[in-house]
Image (spheres, rainbow, N blue to C red):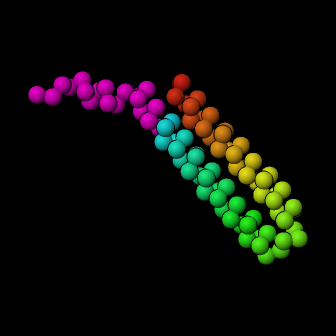
């Protein structure tokens, strides 16, 4: 016969918080990877179309990538802070 405490252990709020933080951090990483990939692809297309503007395109892509990384880091920190509450 199954132990009735197993259900209460599975629905423990602390465990659900850890699960939610892990899923949230994973989604943040996936979103950042997609965003940076799109920036990189568009930058390479722009440089291939107009090589004379490669410096401007490269610097703009680097700044945009840094902004996306900042947002991803903020999202990951929020996910980990939610597990401590």
Which corner quadrant holds the N terminus?
Answer: top left
Q: Is residue 30 left or right of residue 41?
A: left
For image coordinates 62% across by 34% down, the residue present is 77
Question: How many numbered markers are drawn?
Answer: 0
**Most distant residue in the left direction:** 1
Residue 11: x and y in percent read 34, 31
In the displayed structure, 38 sits above or below 52; it is: above
Q: Residue at x 77, y 73 (%)?
A: 48
Q: Main secondary structure of the magenta part?
A: helix
Q: Residue 30: x and y, percent?
A: 56, 51
Q: Quadrant of residue 43?
A: bottom right
Is 78 left, or right, of 43 in this rendering? left
Q: Which residues are magenta?
A: 1-20
Front-most of 5 and 65?
Answer: 65
The percent coordinates of residue 42 (x first, y second) are 71, 67
> Who is closer to the viewer here, 36 or 71?
36
Asked if the stretch drawn in magenta spans residue 17, the answer is yes
Residue at image point 66% right, 39% down: 73
Residue at position x 48%, y 42% from top?
A: 23
Side of 32 where 53 appears, left or right: right
Give the residue furthest to the bottom: 49
- Between 82 and 70, the one lying in front of the other is 70
Instruction: Work out whether 50 lies above or below 29.
Output: below
> Which quadrant of the view contains residue 41?
bottom right
């Amino acid at each position: 016969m199954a132990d009735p405490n197993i259900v209460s252990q599975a629905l423990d709020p602390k465990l659900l918080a850890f699960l939610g933080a892990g899923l949230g951090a994973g989604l943040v990483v996936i979103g950042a990877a997609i965003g940076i990939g799109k920036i990189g692809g568009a930058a390479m297309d722009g440089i291939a179309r107009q090589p004379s503007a490669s410096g401007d395109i490269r610097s703009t892509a680097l700044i945009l990538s840094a902004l996306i990384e900042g947002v991803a880091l903020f999202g990951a920190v929020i996910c980990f802070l939610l597990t401590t509450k």
